[in-house]
Amino acid sequence: MAVFTEVSAEQAQALLDHLQLGSLSSLRGIGAGIENTNYFVDCTQADGHLHRYVLTLFERLTAEQLPFYLRLMQHLAQRGVLVPSPHADSSGEILFEVAGKPAAIVDRLHGGHQMAPDAFHCQQVGAMLARMHLAGKDYPLHQPNLRGLAWWREVVPQLLPFLAADQAELLHSELAYQEQLAASARYGDLPTGPIHADLFRDNVMFEPGEGPGRERLTGFFDFYFAGVDTWLFDIAVCLNDWCIDLTSGRLIEERAAVFVSAYESVRPLSGAEHRLLPALLRAAALRFWVSRLFDLHLPREASLLKAHDPSHFERVLRERIAKPWHALHDEALK
Ligand SMILES: Nc1ncnc2c1ncn2[C@@H]1O[C@H](COP(=O)(O)OP(=O)(O)OP(=O)(O)O)[C@@H](O)[C@H]1O
Ligand SMILES: N[C@@H](CCO)C(=O)O
């Protein structure tokens, strides 16, 4: 179970008192998650209603790094994007200390993950992603995507010795391709802003809606890989997780088209974005192939991570290279 740091009822109540969130009625450690300690916290407030929160103790990120993520969630929630908002004390502080760890309390989203999404799920995620990008435009804090090109450049040479010759060749050549892409004028034209950068199916919640098969999106969470990067990279990360055949890594084009057109119903893609989508789908596959290889072969000291299977993203990358996918027909790209 992923409770790395025990929190007592007294410690939880002390934070609730400080935030005037009411009296603790239940505190339960959350088993899922491999980065942080999370607890479900239910409280009864003066109005007699039960309110549900998530208390997170940050095991890896420091108090210096956390404001970028927590203020981003607050900024987006204030603009109507469905993300859990961190609770502030009377002086506006949102980062606290519990059991010696940096900690925050955020709203608990309703519902659960949808690990077998259909077009309707993708449509909702696509539209909310575009709203999130637009809402982040005036976010004042800045941090680069810490799992972007600079990081791949640093770790790829360390990974090569662990790989078979054909894998090493692919990793090496794809990094060279992405270096060239990042230096191109067209890439420089891509719009950028704060992105989630890890919006996989297990970082989104849905709750049952009206009628069968009509689950409603309740929010995005786990912003702890967020950073400033191209909006197109965020779209590509999503397409590579929400719109694929999980066995082969093949893109399910109909579902991907629904995702992109829902996104475009809120923010139409520029010409440069349309043209570079296939290249960014490769970048997004490379990103998770590299991070999974890194977690498998070079685990950090005192790391809490359990490595996911890297070969999945190797397959996805090979697929995206072999079958570039555009959301538009070739004619429209000319
Ligand atoms: N705001 C929230 N609302 C509802 N449930 C949440 C919320 N935050 C976390 N959870 C639940 O806690 C579980 C673990 O959270 P999360 O995935 O953020 O763990 P983590 O260890 O921080 O990160 P990782 O995904 O890298 O393992 C989630 O799967 C989800 O069920
Ligand atoms: N989404 C990542 C895990 C880190 O959040 C992966 O599947 O490799």
Image (tube, rainbow, N blue to C red):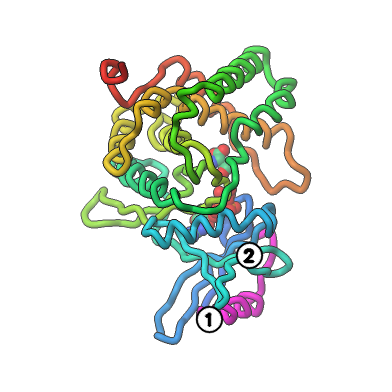
Asked if residue 309 is among those painted magenta in the image, a careful observer would answer: no
Query: Horizontally, is 299 left or right of 108 in the view?
Result: right
Report if residue 1 is visible in the image: no
Q: Earlier in the sequence, mark 1 or mark 2?
A: 1
Quarter of the rendering occupied by the C terminus:
top left
* Residue that mark 2 sits on: 103
Vertical relation: 161 (above or below) 199: above
Asked if residue 22 is among those painted magenta in the image, a careful observer would answer: yes
Number of residue marks: 2
Report if residue 34 is visible in the image: yes
Q: Which residues are magenta?
A: 1-24
Q: Does dot 2 land on a helix, a strand or a loop?
A: strand
Q: Does dot 1 land on a helix, a strand or a loop?
A: loop
Query: Horizontally, is 257 left or right of 249 in the view?
Result: left
Residue at (33%, 37%) from the top-left corner? 259
Horizontal and vertical percent position of residue 132: 40, 49
Most foreground residue, 128 or 169: 128
Q: What is the three-letter code of the residue carrying label 1? A: Gln
Residue at (40%, 85%) from the top-left corner? 47
Residue at (59%, 65%) from the top-left corner? 104
Vertical relation: 215 (above or below) 326: below
Most foreground residue, 34 or 272: 272
Q: What is the three-letter code of the residue carrying label 2? A: Ala
* Residue that mark 1 sits on: 20
Could you give the CA–CA distance between mark 1 and mark 2, rounded to whole angstroms? 16 Å
Residue at (30%, 44%) from the top-left corner? 266
Most foreground residue, 298 or 157: 157
